Amino acid sequence: MNETAHPALLPTGMHDLLPPEAETEAAVVARLMATLTAHGYERVKPPLVEFEETLLSGAGAAMATSTFRMMDPVSHRMIGVRADMTPQIARIAATRLGGVPRPLRLSYAGQVLRVRGSEIRPERQVGQVGAELIGAAGPAADVEAITVASAALAALGVPELTVDITLPTLVPAVAEAYGMSGECDAALRAALDHKDSAAVTALAGKAGKLLERLLLAAGPAAATLAALDRLDLPERGRAERARLGAVLDGLAAAAPELKVTVDPVENRGFEYHTGISFTFFAAASAAQGALGELGRGGRYDAGDPTAPEPATGFTLYTDTILRALPEALAPRRVLLPLGADRRRADALRAAGWITVAALASIGDWREEARRLGCSHVLDGEDPVAVG
């Protein structure tokens, strides 16, 4: 016998965002976008769904298994609900904005939907805010992407911000130099991602010692650079190390307060990236528990796969950011007793207050303010904290 579902029941990985979190999220998105705008990134707004063949082309191919697909009843063609916005921005840059001078700086904000969550991110609907820098190949673009993302997060007050840089093409360069391919290469990637040094040594053959030392090289940026300098890397690997050094020098000048670590073998989530990539984290309190990633980004190929453009960018995740923010970001709410002066109420709203107007006469305005979730009550001309 089928039971009627409770009206508040939602599919796994979906949830309602209630007051005051929904309002806080909107404010967070606005402040992040303001930082991106201030750095020259212009906003675009792609659609929720696209035809399957365009949504999953190029960099979008990596999201194929995460994408909801259905038949469009109008065109009778398969369409997909976006699981990530970066491929959409790359499409816009290559087509609608193909003639715009490069480098092209674009920003975006919106929701994405995924077939399933992961252990790290169980949510299937995720809010994204991001930026893409398209048409710039040098390390200065990598530095800009990281510094702009860190500036956006720092402007919100995210505590103890850390960026972890990875080189997703370094291990493939080693595998190619040592003739590893196919199933062996895939198993090796999995062992490296799980930091299983015994499995790495068993799978890698002649490259085992080198890969084991790469695995152990992860840590603070300066220490990792020194460890890489002691390794006999193949030619492509040396080029990656040189690029990493240039990016770290740029970050030291542009964002000296940012804590930087490097993991030269991490690949999970960077399957379509072609160079310097990165993930942002923040300190978590005991009450918050593990926060997970605040955002990630890196270098990739944009546009037509036969004639790609160099690009880099980042995506910030609003759900994780909300958990990382201090409570001080909660909006100030003031109760206006019945008959409060309208001009004073206008002035409070102009100063950033949220006003809640009483609709009936109440004996104890402080208690009423607490009942309605207000932090203050208007007493004469001034908001007074209700405790």
Image: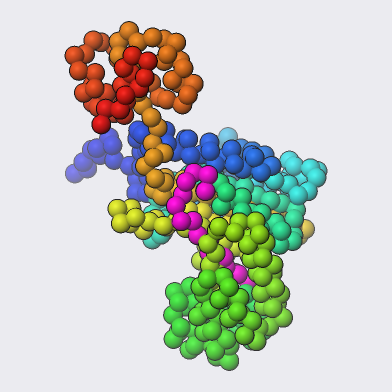
| Image quadrant in which you'd find residue 355 | top left
Number of callouts in the render? 0
Q: Is residue 21 above or below residue 146?
A: above
At x 46%, y 49%, the residue is: 158
324 or 6: nearer the viewer? 324
Please say if 325 is above or below 184. above
Instruction: Measuring from the top left, give residue 283's x and y in whole percent.
Output: 41, 57
Residue name at image x 48 percent, y 73 percent: 193
Q: Position of residue 245 (x, y in %)?
A: 66, 70
Q: Identify the image quadrant of the N terminus.
A: top left
Is residue 159 located in the magenta-colored stretch of the structure? yes
Image quarter of the C terminus: top left
- Along the line of sight, the residue nearer the viewer: 77 or 295: 295
Query: Which range is magenta?
Result: 153-169
Give coordinates of residue 133: x percent, y percent: 68, 51
Residue 200 sits above or below residue 285 on the image: below
Kindly tell me whether residue 56 is visible in this rendering.
no
Who's the residue at 73% across and 40% down the image? Answer: 96
Answer left or right for 362 relative to 335. Answer: left
| Residue 370 within the magenta-colored segment of the rendering | no
Q: Nearer the viewer, residue 345 or 102?
A: 345
Q: Residue furthest bottom?
A: 206
